[in-house]
Amino acid sequence: MEIFTKKLTPIDFDRGLVLPPRSNLEPLQHFQGTIELSTIVESAAGARLLDPVIIHCSTIRGSLVFKRGWYDIARYVGLKSGDTVTFYQEDNGGERFKLTVKNFC
């Protein structure tokens, strides 16, 4: 189930990835403060990072934001402004979440 798709802007690299207002937040509703999301990271071509990444999702000024873990993904995958990420909830061999990346050409 897709939670959100977002085209990245420079702010997403400076302040963290703020989830878009129209995100399907049902899978993330049951937490207070910070939650750790064990996430598989996959390119649009299907290549995966070897190990899942723990993304910390926090509430900041009423919005959900990916901080710790998000910066590691952005750096490792080489994300830049204009790239698109899609975040899913799925049962994938014990991992509940997947982030796919589509690089802007």
Image (cartoon, rainbow, N blue to C red):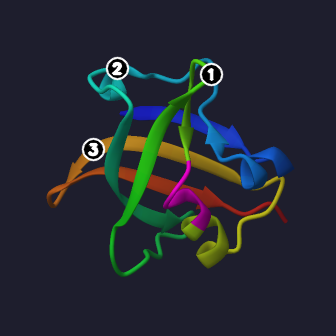
Quarter location, residue 39: bottom left
Q: Mark 3–mark 1 contact, CB under 8 Å?
A: no
Magenta region: 67-71
Could you tell me residue 70's position as x and y percent?
55, 57
Residue at image location 43% in from the left, 54% down from the top: 55
Q: Which mark is residue 39?
A: none
The overriding secondary structure of the stretch rendered in magenta is loop
Q: Which mark is residue 26?
A: 2
| Quadrant for the N terminus in the image | top left
Q: Give the label, 3 or 1, closer to the camera.
A: 1
Residue position marked by numbered label 1 in the rendering: 61
Residue position marked by numbered label 3 in the rendering: 90
Query: Eyeballing the image, is 95 above or below 43?
Result: above
Query: Eyeballing the image, is 60 above or below 9?
Result: above
User: CA gap, disc 3 to disc 1?
Assistant: 28 Å
Residue at image location 59% in from the left, 59% down from the top: 101
The one of 35 and 29 positioned closer to us in this rendering: 35
Q: Secondary structure at mark 1?
A: loop
Q: Give the label, 2 or 1, closer to the camera.
A: 1
Q: Is residue 68 magenta?
A: yes
Q: Is residue 54 magenta?
A: no
Could you tell me residue 8's position as x and y percent?
75, 47
